[in-house]
Image: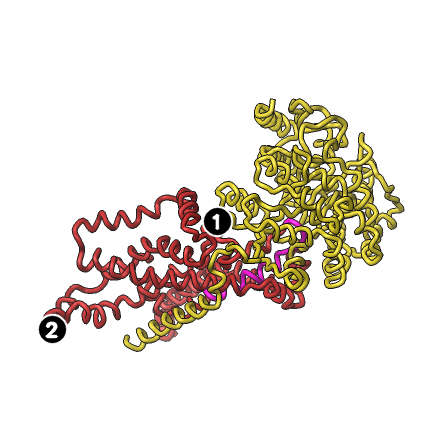
Chain colours: A yellow, B red
Amino acid sequence: MHKRNGKLSLLIAGAATGALVLSGCSGAGSTSGGSDGDHTITALMVGNPQMEDIQKLTAENFTKQTGITVKFTILPENELRDKVTQDVANQGGQYDVATVGAYEVPIWAKNGWLHELSTKSAADTAYDSADLLKPMVQSLTGDDGKMYAAPFYGESSFLMYNKDMFAAAGLTMPEKPTWAQVAEFAKKLDDKQKGVAGICLRGLPGWGELFAPLTTVVNTYGGTWFEKDWTPKVNSPEFKAATDFYVNLVKNYGEKGAAQAGFTECLNTFGQGQAAMWYDATSAAGTLEDPKASKVAGKVGYAYAPVDKTAYSGWLWTWAWAMPKTTKHEDDAWKFISWATSKDYEQVVGKNLGWSRVPSGKRTSTYSIPEYKESAKAFADVTLGSIENANPQNPGVQPRPALGVQFVGIPEFADLGTKVSQEVNAAIAGSSTVDKALTDGQKLAEDVAKNYK
Amino acid sequence: MTTLATPAVKSSTALKPAARRRMGSAIWGVVAWVAGIIFVFPVIWMVLTSFKQEQDAASNPPTWVFTPTFDQYAQVFDRNIMPFLLNSLMASVFSTLLVVILATPAAYALSLRPVAKWTDALFFFISTKMMPAVAALLPVYLLVKNLGMLDNVWTMVLLYTSMNLPLAVWMMRSFLLEVPREVLEAGEVDGAGLVTSIRKIILPIVSPGLAATALICFIFAWNEFFLAVNLTATNAGTAPIFLVGFISSEGLFLARLCAAATLVSLPVLIAGWVAQNKLVRGLSMGAVK
């Protein structure tokens, strides 16, 4: 007994001593930063590869030059959203900068949660804000015409196809295909026996999953969630035709387990050579062209987002650096944001980590860096063309009441889109119908419209 | 022949119950192993996945044969896991110590030397666990904010202590009830005071229970996510916060997440392994039977 007791108390004592020593080590860490004259800022961001890169590069390339220490926290998208909302609403002031998506920036700007950045960026000649791609700036602009976040990297959507499979079947992909052509290709290339899907499309519920590509199909088919005067149009013939087309395409020629497939699953399916085409984010190309992560590197062709009634239909998304109103380090925060979204930072990434990892899609000048052009030659032009031709103010055939290509820029849309996507997902899985999904969706949209009429 | 045959038959009937017993225990053995493997499988799969490349980790059907790699572990360390582990260790160790120090006397006063209305007190303790943490979050957040204690490890120590205290009091109470009164009385007759009784009689008997309680509190504190994600930021983030940072909507992350999860599970595994002997006895003696 005695011996065992001794061992136990020794263990406890050891653990306590250890923790005390550690607390000594992390003593500086346990005080909440924010005293004046302290050049430390805190950054909250999502865990995407570009964010990991900046975490690696900051100490050497930013802190050394400016004396500003940046402490990073990485959280998944949903937690980040909750956290920033909570922090700003309660005046917590825990974060000086945060990555915010294109959907939230205008909404949060309207709520008065973010600092406007136009004044600072205009005053900073070296920043060259005229170089920022116009659609990106548009999508980060509040009602007052000011920019509320600086784009870190941006993307549109395009069609990726396996060149080997197309060549083997004697097919040629046009530069700007129509959805009817894509459906025809999918039919010809779908080979269930070989385990090759004609096309990979997202089926996973979520406004940012299934409804990102689907809303672009709805747009180009002439449909919309709301008309300019907030009349909901979810059960309109155009919306229905687009959804029917999408659901049938993925049911007939789509990937296995399509109802559970999102961006990540499709990236893997297409990257393993198990799909002939994939319509998704332009940011997928970087991974697809990396031989370590994909079996189809060098074999992928890129075409513009397929269309029906519109000339272009690519979506528009950006992760942007924003400054919550509660920050106490406005100047240091701007120094960081302007560095992270500058031309210089692109050079830093290219030289240190490789040119394929440059956070692209936000500046015109990126596409004239010779090294970047070389590393991204397969997809750079189509990507830039897709972004430049995306119009967040008017992405379809009719005027819209709010910003957004693949979403409606109102706070209620996340919930609305997700609920309707769950029903469309059931239609893909075969347990419900598109008609039911859109009839229910119309009712939900009518409730939302009441807030705006 | 018949005389020979009879004992043979007899001996075979005599063997039957033993054989049946052996069969029975073999079946139970198989069931135990199957159940054990089912429970451990997700953990094994996590460890296996952590040695894969992202591409193999995400493949469908799952890859069984692959070349093991430490790439994912390198990436986890690249993201600087240490501050998070240290924060978790501090929050868990200190809160567990505080819980044990506070819960044992409280349990003593509710079992061996019951205070007046001890049932009410006991119910009061457990009633604090009946409200979900999310219901108390806003007041807690505002209080912590006004005290200037947001993003501070000591806030987490305090919260985890209060989170685990009721459970520990109940557990320790049931362990203390196992101390035979006769032994205590015999000690008193021999002139043992309170301190001696505690040191020489009570502690040796309840030490497995104490270990079990401490380990459970440690695990709960170590795994806690909800309060940590809401009340910490860049300085006091704990290991679970570090883990979820690997979930990304762009690109593959499963193998890295598994590597990080394996690393984060190690301290708990080690703690459990160290306390193993006591734990088995502790868990089979008290409240958590």
Per the image, is A430 magenta?
A: no
- Earlier in the chain: of badge 1 and badge 2, it is 2
Q: Which of B243 and B61 is in front in this view?
A: B243
**Could you tell me how far apart the alpha carbons at marks 1 and 2 are, in whole angstroms?**
54 Å
The kind of residue tagged 2 is: Asp
Residues shaded magenta: B249-268
* Tag 1 near tag 2, CB within 8 Å: no
Q: Which residue has dot 1 on it?
A: B230
Residue B243, position as x, y percentages in the image: 55, 57
Q: Which residue has dot 2 on it?
A: B190
Task: In the rendered view, tell whether residue B123 sits above or below residue B109.
Answer: above
Is residue A431 among the parts visible in the rendering?
no
Label 1 Cα crowd, 10 Å radius (few <14 / some 14-19 / many 20+): some
Task: In the rendered view, tell whether residue A26 sits above or below residue A429.
Answer: below
Q: Residue B93: which numbered mark, if any?
A: none
Residue A151, position as x, y percentages in the image: 69, 46
Label 2 Cα crowd, 10 Å radius (few <14 / some 14-19 / many 20+): few
Please give left or right for residue A134 compared with residue A416 in the image.
right
Secondary element at tag 2: loop
